[in-house]
Amino acid sequence: MNTKLALISTAAIFVAVTAGIVASGSQAVPWTEKERQRIASLSLSNLPALPPDPSNAVADVPAAAALGRKLFFDTRLSSNGEVACASCHLPDRQFQDGLPLGRGIGETPRRTMPIAGTAYSPWQFWDGRSDSQWAQALGPLENPLEHGSERTAVVEVVSANYSDEFRAVFGTSPADLPLDHAFANVGKAIAAFERTIMPKRSRFDAYADAVAEGQNSDALSAQEAAGLKLFIGEANCLNCHNGPLLTDNDFHNTGVAAVPSLPTDMGRAEGAISVRNDPFNCLGPYSDADPEECMELTFIKADGEELVRAFKTPSLRDVAERPPFMHAGQIASLADVVAHYNLAPTAPEGHSELVPLGLTLEEREALVAFLSSLSSLEPLLD
């Protein structure tokens, strides 16, 4: 659960309230010690080491990542030979597709999620219905709207084209394993590749590192710095978008409108049930983890009104590069997203966690400007 952060007024953003003043563009922006600590906590410089995935014994094996990379781009893993993981998770678009709803064999009822940094998350998908990257990778392969294939066909493709590489990683060929075991290993190889996909440094990171050291920086404009002050203060963004990946990896109802043409989507309320019943979860027969290493799943919160229409907090890294927004692409622009949080509309179902912010147009524009500073300065994939 998130700790509610004390609100900090932005009324004196250009008035020196502390000796810690950092240059931003042509303006001197004052930061209190508490603000400097909050800003520093968001820098990629403070991203901890990647945690192990005990459910995937080959998670950090280079040969598994190399195999997984090939599988990620292989359209032969789909029923029509035209859809690969990379068809929706495009490397040159922050591993998403820019569409309101993902499209594979058919159109899905949700937005394609980005991948960078998701190895840090205990839950995958908008509703958290998988508890590892490898379990997540298996779902689209058999989803009739995505790859439209089934596990027998997937394993046959891997056997015919990657048997030697598979054997080098897992010690045996896919054809010599029980079908479900071989299928699980396909997901584990893809996950090993996805664990290597991380966000890159942005202008914000350069600024945050300077602030942390009490140094001057012109990495952000005066407007972007004003947006940052709102972000860590009275706009309440840190409640959900915290840490170097700018996400709490949790689930929240933020009152986003339902799409009338789509089936009712209850979000985490359904995802929590699905992940407990998934044979490929951390406690399942294909996991490499000991039961005591599956604490997230063991102590999952699986019911309660707060789960209704609660969706996973996406990372804000590269957020300006991947409109539209929300779980079904309901909101077209970042300006509209900020306006939504400012108004805090009633949720269509369940209870929204938002409260009206009362931000002015100038303040909302500053927030949008700051979000643009989070874009990576180099490609996410070499």
Image (cartoon, helix red, strand yellow):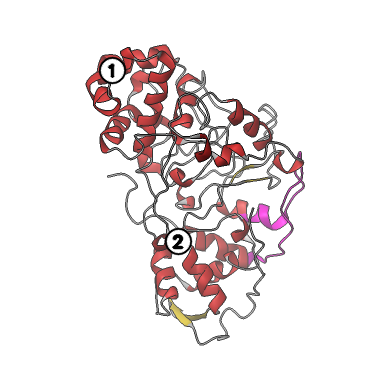
Residue 281: x percent and y percent?
52, 30
Residue 22, placed above or below residue 334: below
Q: Nearer the viewer, residue 77 or 128?
A: 128
Q: Nearer the viewer, residue 79 or 289?
A: 289
**Left or right, 212 with reference to 109:** left
Amino acid type indicated by mark 2:
Ser
- 355 within the magenta span: yes
Which quadrant, please, contains the C terminus? top left
Tell me what residue is drawn at x 60 percent, y 37 percent. Answer: 298
Q: Main secondary structure of the magenta part?
A: loop
Tell me what residue is drawn at x 41 percent, y 44 percent. Answer: 52
Residue 330: x percent and y percent?
62, 40
Tell me what residue is drawn at x 68 percent, y 48 percent. Answer: 254
Amino acid type indicated by mark 1:
Ser
Residue 65 figure quarter? top left
- 248 within the magenta span: no
Count numbered badges in the picture. Answer: 2
Q: Nearer the viewer, residue 47 or 199?
A: 47
Residue 173, placed above or below residue 308: above
Q: N-terminal of the two: label 1 or label 2?
A: 1
Residue 332: x percent and y percent?
57, 45
**Left or right, 72 with reference to 345:** left
Residue 309 figure quarter? top right
Can the viewer see residue 137 in this picture?
yes
Can the viewer see residue 79 in this picture?
no
Check disc 1 and report its element: helix, strand or loop. Answer: loop
Residue 186: x percent and y percent?
37, 25
For label 1, count other residues whose C-alpha is less than 10 Å away and answer few (under 14), some (14-19) or many (20+): some
Q: Which residue is mark 2?
A: 373
Check disc 2 and report its element: helix, strand or loop. Answer: loop
Q: Which residue is mark 1?
A: 173
Q: Which residues are magenta?
A: 338-361
